[in-house]
């Protein structure tokens, strides 16, 4: 398979290595297709009534890839970075987690962020997953081989060869000529791949494309609001994104929060023009930068500039730089727990962390509305991770790409070979 | 103003006027020549522009037609004509088509006026371009000028619209070519000329890139907007006259008579200004040289003309000062030389005449002296003779009375002899007039002191004295004794002139370089002839007197370096005027 990212090492906490890490490392629990927690490295768990004290009973007989048994102490050490402020205690085949506040969504969070790992003799990371790292050339290529001692049974694939640092267009070409079996897809590539009838794997819409204003710029909120109201998301979604993902004006995707639809996405050009007209001519300008790593990011930014021009705003577009008043960025949903996901997105956007009144969706909605009401962040789309698969790829169960984009390839095999 | 100065000014003025006149003619001729050349060059560039625009119009229409008839366009039209048409699939299709057909601008617009794909601004997909749906005959329409909106700018385009039709549904193909730097670079321009393209609302481009200074062209643009016709105006870019350019603007009109911009041909006036400045420098140099030449010529000319004249003038002044022996040496044989010869002859004749006159006057004076001496001596001699004859007769006829007669006669003889001695003494005094012993003298005080001697005499003669003495009279250097004697003589002369009484006025006044004394009587006056001889020694109008009084006065005044004059009219009195330094 090929990927754009160029991870230097397989660090379970590194964002650029996340899909590969999900092949090598495992969490305590996993979510099934319905979002229900299922045992993984933990075979059972319980918590007290306040959800502040959790106990996870570890799966016996699990070994890390270096042959050492998975001990509760290693599990606790692995989880500590994901649970700052929590007290983790290893106790025989179980670990105890004590938190300062109720954590009813802990299982959801651990399903994505609680990967268990240990350090090998060389200081590298070793996991317990269906694949182990056979070779790793930082930023260039890697080879993963099937873990014959995997507790869930050996994966169907023998090896996965990963080519790093390949552009989307090159990946698609390689997919078309049979040089790779799995390629990442952007909107432009999706149209071609779909036209070729290829299998497309998709995560849930977990990538938030948004406009984020630089701190302190611009000072006048009317300018931000005018820009937000001028944007025609539907045209961009239809043409530039090939109708993938969701149009949104919320930070959390609809599938995660359930209330994203309540944030209006339709443009209001008349109101935008009126707001812009209230500003002095010299203040009707914004420098828009875009993250070149976002597939189709430049086209989206240019379309935003076109919409803004209709409202009377001048928005020159360029790659993101320190002079940008605002930037088109991609923020990833970091957790399956809505509250933690919102906090993570807000942190990534450089906003002040929300203070929800509670875990209830209503409180979360109110918190998000407060975050968005000054238009310092203008959400545009929630997009999924997309992959194109070669025709010989076969998948048994579960889906090869999980909701947050993790790879579940232990049941993937190639046609013509016995699973 | 001297003749030399006049001559210099005349020469200099003549040179300057001549140079200025020639310079003005040359400058005017040069300017007109440049203007004619400019007009020709601008006309040539304007013609070049029209030809180039026409050529591009001819070329672009077939290219856009080719795009409209291309398979890719028909495929797009087919795609858009279906029930499940997805415009999104065509958004990026026109950029390679535009590049393949060498079009700067290319847009595809669906039959309902929706922009499907734009090569120049891909992000404008699905925008409305309804203007293109308003007419059906695009395929027969010629190219036209259109303002193209770009992401960060606007451009002026030569645009052509053609229509591809599939299943009664239209696909509008809008192709265009930019009138930009490349367009301007295609012109072959003479040195000093440039072509600019103005786009509404305010954008100026040259072959080298955008032109920032648009303010100076504002009047040209304003006139173009108003008149919609070609305009020629001069534009000054800075305070330096050499920065000026003559711009000829050709309006670029779009559909609906809308002004899209203007083609500007600029012709620099730098060469003309440089030539004019060179000519001006030459004029200044020629004028300066001419003035210097005039100076030299005037000096030479005056050396030839005015120097003899000045020598003549100096000779004349010397003659006027009494130096009659002056000789003017002029070698030239022209009129000036003849004048100098005449002058020298005049002085020679004057000398000779003066000598003759002096001799005559000396003879006359001796005669007058002899006559006067004879007259003066004759009067006492007759009594002497009578007395002696009486003594002889008394001795002979009356011896007894001889002693008495002798006593009386000797008394008479002594008296007459005394008279003779007095006469001889006066003559001796005149002959022995001493030189003045100069000292600082208050003239007013001297006048008052001299008059004291005559108070009784004036009173007895019935003469009223009027003194008008200037208070600010400065002191003079004089011999008070001699000058006082001269004044006394004048007063005595005035009293003698008024035997029936009258008024005597003595007036002193400051004069330029000295003082003046006037002695005026109201006596019987003198004739002109008498006035002319008045100061001649031994000449007198009186029955008594030696005629030496006024001669002594003139001698004293002359010895003081002064002058004495008399003016008189018979019956109105006489005034003597003495000027002293």
Image: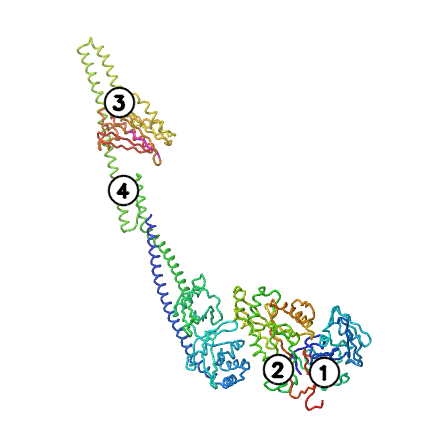
SS at mark 4? helix
Instruction: Locate residue B103, reporting x and y percent.
Output: 48, 79
Label 4 packing within 10 angstroms: few (<14), some (14-19), many (20+):
many
Which is nearer the eye, B568 or A59? A59
- Res B319 visible: yes
Please indicate whether residue B569 sits to the left or right of residue A25 in the image.
Answer: left
Label 3 packing within 10 angstroms: few (<14), some (14-19), many (20+):
some
Q: Which residue is mark 2?
A: A170
Instruction: Locate residue A386, reporting x and y percent.
Output: 64, 81
- Check the picture and name the quadrant holding the C terminus of chain A: bottom right
Q: Which residue is mark 3?
A: B462
Marks 1 and 2, how far apart at CA? 22 Å
Q: Which residue is mark 1?
A: A144
Which is nearer the eye, A299 or B286? A299
SS at mark 2? helix
The image quadrant that residue A394 belongs to is bottom right
Q: Which residue is mark 4?
A: B347
Q: Chain of mark 1?
A: A
């Amino acid at each position: 398979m090929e990927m754009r990212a160029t991870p230097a090492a397989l660090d379970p906490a590194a964002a650029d290595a996340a899909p590969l890490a999900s092949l090598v490392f495992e969490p305590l629990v996993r979510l099934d297709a319905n979002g229900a927690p299922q045992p993984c490295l933990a075979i059972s768990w319980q918590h007290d009534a306040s959800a502040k004290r959790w106990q996870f009973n570890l799966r016996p007989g699990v070994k890390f890839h270096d042959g050492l048994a998975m001990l509760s102490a290693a599990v606790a050490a692995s989880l500590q970075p994901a649970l700052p402020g929590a007290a983790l205690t290893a106790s025989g085949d179980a670990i105890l987690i004590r938190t300062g506040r109720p954590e009813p969504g802990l299982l959801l969070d651990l399903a994505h962020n609680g990967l268990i790992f240990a350090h090998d003799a060389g200081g590298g990371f070793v996991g317990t997953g269906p694949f182990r790292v056979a070779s790793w050339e930082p930023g260039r290529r890697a080879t993963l081989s099937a873990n014959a001692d995997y507790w869930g049974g050996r994966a169907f694939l023998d090896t996965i060869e990963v080519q790093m640092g390949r552009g989307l267009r090159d990946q698609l070409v390689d997919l078309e000529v049979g040089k790779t079996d799995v390629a990442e897809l952007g909107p432009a590539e999706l149209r071609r791949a779909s036209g070729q009838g290829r299998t497309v794997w998709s995560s849930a819409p977990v990538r938030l494309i948004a406009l984020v204003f630089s701190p302190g710029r611009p000072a006048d909120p009317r300018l931000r609001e005018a820009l937000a109201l001028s944007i025609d998301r539907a045209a961009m979604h239809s043409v530039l994104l090939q109708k993938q993902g969701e149009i949104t004006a919320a930070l959390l995707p609809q599938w995660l929060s359930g209330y994203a639809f309540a944030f209006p996405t339709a443009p209001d050009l008349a109101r935008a023009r009126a707001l812009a007209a209230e500003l002095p001519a010299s203040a009707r300008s914004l420098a828009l930068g875009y993250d070149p790593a976002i597939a189709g990011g430049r086209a989206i930014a240019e379309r935003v500039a076109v919409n803004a021009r209709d409202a009377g705003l001048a928005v020159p577009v360029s790659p993101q730089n320190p002079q940008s008043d605002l930037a088109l960025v991609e923020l990833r949903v970091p957790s399956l727990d809505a509250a933690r996901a919102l906090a993570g997105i807000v942190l990534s956007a450089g906003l002040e962390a929300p203070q929800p009144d509670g875990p209830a969706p209503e409180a979360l909605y109110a918190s998000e509305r407060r975050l968005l009401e000054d238009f310092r962040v203008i959400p545009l789309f929630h997009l999924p991770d997309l992959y194109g698969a070669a025709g010989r790829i076969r998948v048994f169960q579960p889906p090869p790409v999980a909701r947050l984009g993790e790879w579940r390839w232990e049941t993937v095999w190639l046609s013509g070979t016995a699973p | 103003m001297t003749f030399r100065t006049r001559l210099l000014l005349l020469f200099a003025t003549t040179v300057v006027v001549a140079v200025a006149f020639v310079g003005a003619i040359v400058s005017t001729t040069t300017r007109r020549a440049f203007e004619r050349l400019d007009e020709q060059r601008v006309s040539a560039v304007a013609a070049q522009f029209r030809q180039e625009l026409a050529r591009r119009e001819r070329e672009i229409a077939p290219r856009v037609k080719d795009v409209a008839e291309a398979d890719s366009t028909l495929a797009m039209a087919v795609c858009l004509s279906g029930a499940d048409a997805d415009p999104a699939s065509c958004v990026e299709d026109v950029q390679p088509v535009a590049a393949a057909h060498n079009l700067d601008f290319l847009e595809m617009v669906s039959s309902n006026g929706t922009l499907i794909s734009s090569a120049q601004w891909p992000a404008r997909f699905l925008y409305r371009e309804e203007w293109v749906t308003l007419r059906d005959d695009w395929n027969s329409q010629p190219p036209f000028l259109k303002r193209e909106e770009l992401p960060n700018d606007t451009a002026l385009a030569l645009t052509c619209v053609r229509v591809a039709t599939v299943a009664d549904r239209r696909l509008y193909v809008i192709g265009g070519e930019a009138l930009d730097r490349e367009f301007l670079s295609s012109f072959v321009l003479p040195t000093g000329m440039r072509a600019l393209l103005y786009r509404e609302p305010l954008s100026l481009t040259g072959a080298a890139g955008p032109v920032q200074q648009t303010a100076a062209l504002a009047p040209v643009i304003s006139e173009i907007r108003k008149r919609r016709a070609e305009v020629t105006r001069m534009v000054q870019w800075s305070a330096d006259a050499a920065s000026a350019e003559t711009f000829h603007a050709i309006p670029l009109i779009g559909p609906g008579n809308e002004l899209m911009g203007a083609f500007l041909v600029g012709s620099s006036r730098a060469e003309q200004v440089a030539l004019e400045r060179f000519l001006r420098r030459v004029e200044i140099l020629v004028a300066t040289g001419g003035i210097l030449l005039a100076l030299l010529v005037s000096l030479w000319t005056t050396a030839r003309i005015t120097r003899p004249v000045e020598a003549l003038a100096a000779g004349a002044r010397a003659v006027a000062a009494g130096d009659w022996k002056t000789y003017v040496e002029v070698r030239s044989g022209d009129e000036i030389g003849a004048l100098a010869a005449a002058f020298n002859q005049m002085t020679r004749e004057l000398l000779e005449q003066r000598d003759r006159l002096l001799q005559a006057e000396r003879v006359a004076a001796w005669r007058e002296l002899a006559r006067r001496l004879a007259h003066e001596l004759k009067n006492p001699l007759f009594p002497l003779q009578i007395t002696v004859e009486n003594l002889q007769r008394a001795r002979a006829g009356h011896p007894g009375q001889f002693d008495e007669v002798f006593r009386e006669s000797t008394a008479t003889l002594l008296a007459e002899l005394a008279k003779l001695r007095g006469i001889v003494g006066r003559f001796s005094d005149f002959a022995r007039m001493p030189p003045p012993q100069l000292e600082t003298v208050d003239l007013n005080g001297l006048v008052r002191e001299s008059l004291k001697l005559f108070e009784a005499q004036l009173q007895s003669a019935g003469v009223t004295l009027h003194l008008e003495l200037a208070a600010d009279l400065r002191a003079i250097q004089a011999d008070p004794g001699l000058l006082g004697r001269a004044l006394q003589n004048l007063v005595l002369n005035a009293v003698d002139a008024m035997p029936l009484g009258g008024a005597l006025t003595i007036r002193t006044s400051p004069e330029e370089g000295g003082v003046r004394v006037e002695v005026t009587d109201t006596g019987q006056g003198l004739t002109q002839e008498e006035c002319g001889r008045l100061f001649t020694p031994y000449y007198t109008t009186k029955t008594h007197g030696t005629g030496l009084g006024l001669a002594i006065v003139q001698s004293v005044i002359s010895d003081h370096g002064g002058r004495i004059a008399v003016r008189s009219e018979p019956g109105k009195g006489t005034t003597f005027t003495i000027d002293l330094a």
